[in-house]
Image (cartoon, rainbow, N blue to C red):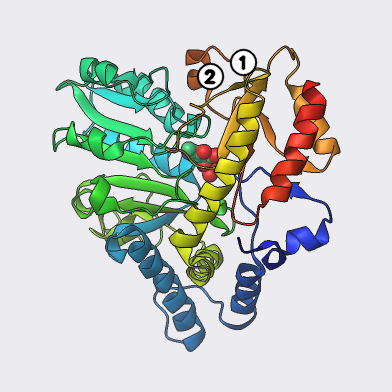
């Protein structure tokens, strides 16, 4: 395994840091930090409607970032646009669908019980106003999709299915191709790729979704920018939620006409600087041989961590099927007999080990599993076996 820690300044600036909170956000490589700083120092200006070279250079990089992402997920760059974060975009798309009369009273939608709140609350808030119903797809004892439950709940009243490819608690990689094969072509299929994008190659044609949202701060770019894929036919059909600069073909005192392109969803000045951070994050990934290295490295670390978790399986409740390989490198658990699970969090923090405890913005899933929160440790490309050993030294000291 290649040691990538030296590519990430945070480790030099925080000696002894064991960073295992990657599911929440990843650290940034020097490559990205330097390029963003270079861009701001040399090439930055506002984009669109330019006549000068500084703006032209910024626009080129902005478009390049979309082209890179389009290649990364196998779509056209004219189907990619940016938003602030996933929460923000799912609020927008849900309102766009309702305002475009796609979701109406008596309709139903189907969400994964494993969804993050960002893919639950926007729909709940909207359902109060528009009167559509919400059903949840449950999971089986092994945490995979309960297909019997799905078959019972999916009927002609379901207009939309929205779910994450990977849960941020169970770490199961859900079979979205099978899910898609069960949907009729009119059902809008929204996929949250936030927890898989750091590790697993995405191909929107292969999944056949209408919309894909994925975060970049979990993939080494800066916070405050999300990429969204929206299928061309929906770009044309949907009413945007926000109007503003850059969204319209024409406006008069009593009339306006939105663009029929992706521009109608990017109102106002876009986050140009963070878009460059995404471009450079993908280039960094290209430099370390992307999927071959990342996934192979991750599987090696998963196997190593799973062996250690297995040796403690009578002392901790693991929120995943222990033998499964259909997972990413994130582990949620409870220590048996410890009433105050927050205490675990504090002990890890005292030892300079960053993990996260709580409900992970997934109350419905925790309630379904009858859990009042979990402790979560998550790996990424710069982690190594030594980090895992340090984590287990502390966990064992808590248990024994
Ligand atoms: C599966 C999943 N979806 C959505 C989100 C929300 O992302 P954001 O906070 O960037 O809106 C997260 C955050 O961890 C997540 O794990």
Q: Position of residue 233 (x, y in %)?
A: 18, 51
Name the one closer to the observer, 356 or 291: 291
Is the distance from the Cβ of mark 1 to the nearest ligand 1 atom less than 8 Å?
A: no
Q: Is residue 358 visible to the viewer in this orientation of the structure?
A: no
Q: Residue 76 location in percent, x, y?
A: 27, 63
Checking the image for residue 32, the label placed there is: none
Identified at 69% across, 15% down, the residue is 336
Tell me the crowding category of disc 2: few under 14, some 14 to 19, or many 20 or more residues within 10 angstroms, Cα based.
many
Secondary structure state at the residue bearing disc 2: helix
Q: Earlier in the sequence, mark 1 or mark 2?
A: 2
Image quarter of residue 51: bottom left
Work out whether 206 lies above or below 110: below
> Could you tell me which secondary element the residue under label 1 belongs to?
loop
The residue shown at (34%, 36%) is 94
Q: Which residue is mark 2?
A: 366
Q: Quadrant of the N terminus?
A: bottom right
40 with respect to 364 (left or right): right
Q: Nearer the viewer, residue 126 or 326?
A: 326
Q: At 35% from the left edge and 41% from the top edge, which residue is drawn? A: 191
Residue at 52% in and 28% down: 322
Q: Is residue 332 above or below residue 106?
A: below
Is residue 141 visible to the viewer in this orientation of the structure?
Answer: yes
Please tell me in which quadrant of the rendered image residue 97 appears: top left
**Farthest bottom residue?**
53
Q: Quadrant of the C terminus?
A: top right
Estimate how packed mark 1 is, as few (under 14), some (14 to 19) or many (20 or more) residues with alpha carbons within 10 Å: few
Residue behind mark 1:
372
Discs 1, 2 touching: Cβ within 8 Å: yes
Quick check: 33 left or right of 66? right
Choose between 213 and 196: the one closer to the eye.
196
How far apart in space, not on screen, are marks 1 and 2 (Cα)?
6 Å
């Amino acid at each position: 395994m290649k040691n990538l820690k030296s590519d990430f300044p945070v480790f030099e600036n925080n000696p002894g840091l064991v960073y295992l909170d990657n599911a929440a956000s990843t650290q940034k490589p020097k490559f990205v930090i330097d390029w963003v700083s270079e861009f701001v120092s040399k090439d930055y200006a506002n984009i669109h409607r330019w006549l000068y070279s500084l703006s032209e250079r910024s626009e080129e990089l902005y478009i390049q970032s979309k082209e890179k992402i389009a290649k990364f997920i196998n779509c056209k760059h004219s189907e990619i646009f940016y938003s602030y974060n996933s929460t923000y975009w799912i609020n927008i798309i849900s309102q766009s669908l309702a305002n475009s009369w796609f979701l109406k009273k008596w309709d139903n939608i189907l969400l994964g019980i494993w969804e993050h709140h960002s893919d639950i609350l926007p729909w709940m808030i909207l359902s109060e106003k528009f009167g559509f119903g919400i059903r949840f797809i449950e999971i089986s004892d092994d945490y995979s999709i309960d297909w019997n439950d799905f078959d019972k709940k999916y009927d002609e009243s379901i207009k939309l299915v929205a779910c994450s490819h990977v849960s941020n608690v169970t770490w199961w990689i859900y079979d979205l191709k099978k899910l898609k094969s069960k949907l009729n072509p009119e059902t809008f299929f929204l996929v949250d790729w936030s927890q898989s994008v750091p590790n697993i190659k995405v191909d929107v044609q292969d999944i056949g979704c209408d919309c894909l949202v994925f975060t970049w701060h979990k993939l080494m770019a800066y916070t405050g920018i999300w990429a969204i894929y929206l299928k061309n036919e929906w770009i044309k059909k949907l009413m945007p939620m926000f109007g503003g600069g850059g969204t319209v073909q024409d406006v008069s005192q009593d009339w306006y006409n939105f663009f029929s392109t992706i521009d109608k969803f990017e109102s106002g000045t876009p986050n140009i600087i963070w878009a460059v951070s995404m471009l450079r994050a993908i280039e960094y990934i290209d430099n370390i041989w992307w999927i071959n290295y990342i996934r192979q490295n991750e599987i090696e670390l998963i196997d190593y961590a799973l062996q250690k978790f297995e040796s403690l399986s009578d002392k901790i409740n693991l929120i995943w099927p222990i033998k499964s390989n259909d997972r990413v490198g994130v582990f949620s658990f409870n220590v048996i007999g410890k009433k105050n699970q927050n205490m675990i969090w504090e002990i890890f923090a005292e030892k300079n080990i960053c993990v996260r405890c709580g409900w992970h913005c997934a109350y419905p899933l925790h309630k379904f599993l009858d859990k009042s929160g979990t402790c979560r440790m998550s790996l990424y490309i710069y982690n190594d076996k030594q980090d895992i050993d340090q984590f287990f030294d502390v966990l064992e000291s808590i248990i024994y």
